[in-house]
Image (cartoon, rainbow, N blue to C red):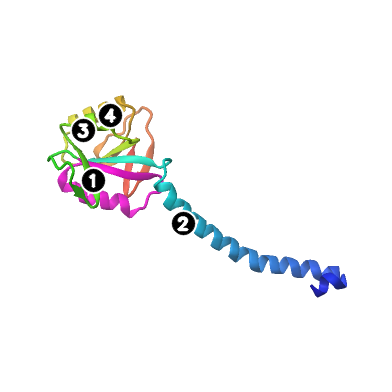
Amino acid sequence: AFLFFSKIRSGYSRIQLTLFLILAVPIDSMCRLMGKRHLLVHYRHSNSAQKMLIITTKEEASAAIKRLRSKKGWFYNIIGVAVMDQNMESSRIEGVKVVANRENLLEKVVTMEMDSAIIISDQMTDDYVTTLIRSLQAVGKTVHIRLHEYELSGGDRRLQQIGDYATVS
């Protein structure tokens, strides 16, 4: 304030710049970190986040949910699990509701509010997985598949990381 009122301009601009840098950089960094944390939490539960169904077996369901949650993916929200080898509807695995089984999966998918499905299973046959992929794509759902279960062969494919899994969509 003294420099401003005494009109010593050369010292005023240097001190103002120094104070600005000392105060602005830490305040800006803290605001960015808090804002990012806030936005990620709200985005995941908003209508913009991808609503994803996990298709797997009972044996692999718990581990699949844990792996998907471990990476804290910001663009998807797990809305349910389809257990393909047992009828476990209305029960919960790792806090996620089991919404379908092998017999009623396609009926449920048509009526569910979901954007995509991820197939995580070493126990389903290749023929069944291929049929399932085609059926899900026919009703307009994006299908993600673990890479080691799917041969890459031409076509329009997108590689991405969902949780701890490498997938082809």
Q: Secondary structure at mark 2?
A: helix
Instruction: Check contact, mark 3 vs mark 2: CB within 8 A.
Output: no
In the rendered structure, which disc, 1 or 2, sits on the residue that comes first in sequence?
Answer: 2
How packed is label 4: few (under 14 Cα within 10 Å), some, or many (20 or more)? few
Give x and y (percent) for residue 50. Answer: 38, 40
Give x and y (percent) for residue 47. Answer: 41, 41
What type is the residue that disc 3 sits on? Leu
Q: Which mark is residue 37?
A: 2
Q: Secondary structure at mark 3?
A: helix
In the rendered structure, which disc, 4 or 1, sits on the residue that comes first in sequence?
Answer: 1
Q: Which residue is mark 4?
A: 110
Magenta stretch, residue numbers: 56-82
Q: Which residue is mark 3?
A: 105
**Residue 67 located within the stretch drawn in magenta:** yes
Front label number (1 vs 2): 1
Q: CA distance from mark 1 to mark 2?
A: 26 Å
What type is the residue that disc 4 sits on? Val
In the rendered structure, which disc, 2 or 4, sits on the residue that comes first in sequence?
Answer: 2
Q: Quadrant of residue 112?
A: top left
Q: Is residue 23 above or below residue 72?
A: below
Front label number (2 vs 4): 4
Q: Quadrant of residue 154?
A: top left
Q: Which residue is mark 1?
A: 97
Residue found farthest to the bottom: 2
Would you say 2 lies left or right of 103 here? right
**Residue at position x 26%, y 36% from top?**
150
In the rendered structure, which disc, 3 or 2, sits on the residue that comes first in sequence?
Answer: 2
Would you say 82 lies left or right of 117 here? left
Residue found farthest to the top: 138
In the rendered structure, which disc, 1 or 3, sits on the residue that comes first in sequence?
Answer: 1
Q: Secondary structure at mark 1?
A: strand
Q: CA distance from mark 4 to mark 1?
A: 17 Å
